[in-house]
Amino acid sequence: MRIRQQASKFIFAAGAILLLATPATNVFARGVELAVPADVIPPEIPEDNQLTQEKIDLGRKLYFDTRISTDGTVGCVTCHDPKHALADGRGAKTSAGVGGAMGTRNTPTVLNAAFLSTQFWDGRAATLEEQAAQPLLNPIEHGFTNTAAVEARIKELGEYAELFKAAFGSDAITLERAAKAIASFERTIISLDAPIDRFLAGEAGAISQSAKRGWELFNTKARCNTCHGHIGAFPLFTDEDYHNLGVGTQALDFAKVAREAAETVAQGKSIDELVLGDAEASELGRFIVSGLPKHLGAFKTPQLRNVALTAPYMHDGSEATLRDVIDFYDRGGNDNPYLDGGMRPLGLTEQERSDLVALLETFSSDDLERFSSLEQEKPAH
Ligand code: HEC
Ligand code: HEC
């Protein structure tokens, strides 16, 4: 995880309430409370996008508004649906955007994404603000080809000028402001109250015997903790690093695909458009961002919160169930020249596999109901 040197400058968590650390912060003054437990480092809030209720309200409306797409059918909600733990519940391995166009990647949840120090499977966005603009400008997600087209659409809808004014002080509708508002809304989509949390806080009966054995395995024989380790200050079960597990690498000529991808990006295509539109370029993983050979086919270790609710799995959706994921790890991933050194056959028994699945099921928050009515919520002011 990123050491959040700046975080303390902005906000300190005290109990469930965020207290003001500097006069510039208006988190508490505006009555915005984030559900961050006391010992967890709160999400970083950029200096130029302080959290206000007005921005959150605007961001929420934008997030659910499917009219903000070229064919009028796709919103963030289409692929990140509160009814499906803020992931895509439509059942395909990867997600479809405007006109039913299929992308190359499995949709991660937006739930708790505020805590992550990079966004996307390859970490190509450093902030939620930077992330939010990309799907709007992707030809197979919201479908717009340029910034002006997004802005024109939001203006056409006629309902937004007032909300932009309330949030930003003037009614100018810009993509940058829209992204800031959506990011602010996403910072409120937090839930860290699952049976595993209560178990780790000392409530022995919070999880089953099978899940307890799973937790022991997770941290020993199954080696999950080497990448999905848990610490109290950052309880998302990810090292936020990139690893090649061999997902989707079968028969890929990395050298050729890397060369072609570099040429396409040099010609001006965005990485976002390239990787979501081209299945081979997608498999380069983190390499397309860093250019480092160790990142060939390496993807971000995903958070495991609510993972039982967000099937299918892996960046390409290639594993249908949690049991399939465990079987994948048991055989040591898929062999390829860049396989992470930490991957090796585990020799798990049938019972141990079931125990690990039982454990992962305890990572689901109990309070996700509260997000399902978000769309209907009226602005708080
Ligand atoms: C057509 C489906 C689709 C739409 C529409 C869509 N997303 Fe996504 N989202 C995805 C996919 C697929 C990824 C992973 C892409 C990748 O890693 O390259 C993703 C990744 C993300 C992530 C990164 C999460 C993480 O753990 O790294 C966030 C945050 C996010 N989307 C928010 C949004 C927001 C906000 C909107 C609306 C402006 C939006 N998405 C619209 C499918 C979609
Ligand atoms: C070497 C690091 C590493 C180890 C060890 C590891 N993981 Fe992962 N895990 C990852 C990465 C990286 C991904 C994404 C890979 C991809 O899509 O290419 C992932 C994906 C997953 C997913 C899919 C999540 C989703 O939202 O799609 C689950 C579930 C998971 N791991 C659980 C486990 C369990 C359980 C163990 C132990 C048996 C384990 N992992 C061991 C790094 C690791």
Image (cartoon, grey):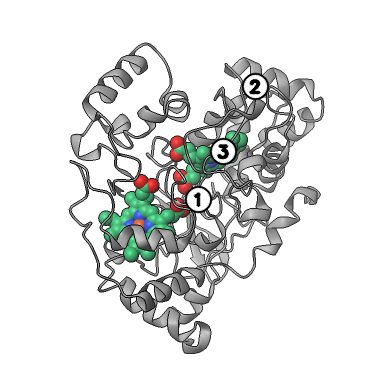
Q: Position of residue 90 (x, y in %)?
A: 64, 46
Q: Position of residue 282 (x, y in %)?
A: 38, 32
Whether residue 240 appears in this view of the structure is: no
Furthest-top residue in view?
Answer: 267
Q: Nearer the viewer, mark 3 or mark 1?
A: 3
Q: What is the three-letter code of the residue carrying label 1?
A: Ala
Q: Which residue is mark 2?
A: 150
Say the numbered circle drawn on residue 95.
3
**Residue shown at 72% from the left, 44% from the top:** 57
Residue 70, quarter of picture = top right
Say the numbered circle drawn on residue 113.
1
Report whether the residue tagged 3 is closer than 8 Å to ligand 1.
yes
Please state if 258 lies on the left or on the right of 136 as rendered.
left
Q: Position of residue 134 (x, y in %)?
A: 52, 29
Q: Residues within 10 Å of mark 2 (few under 14, many from 20)?
A: many
Report the Cα–Cα distance between label 3 and label 2: 21 Å
Whether residue 82 appears in this view of the structure is: yes
Say the numbered circle drawn on residue 93.
none
Q: Position of residue 104 (x, y in %)?
A: 47, 34
Report whether the residue tagged 1 is closer than 8 Å to ligand 1.
yes
Q: Residues within 10 Å of mark 1 (few under 14, many from 20)?
A: many
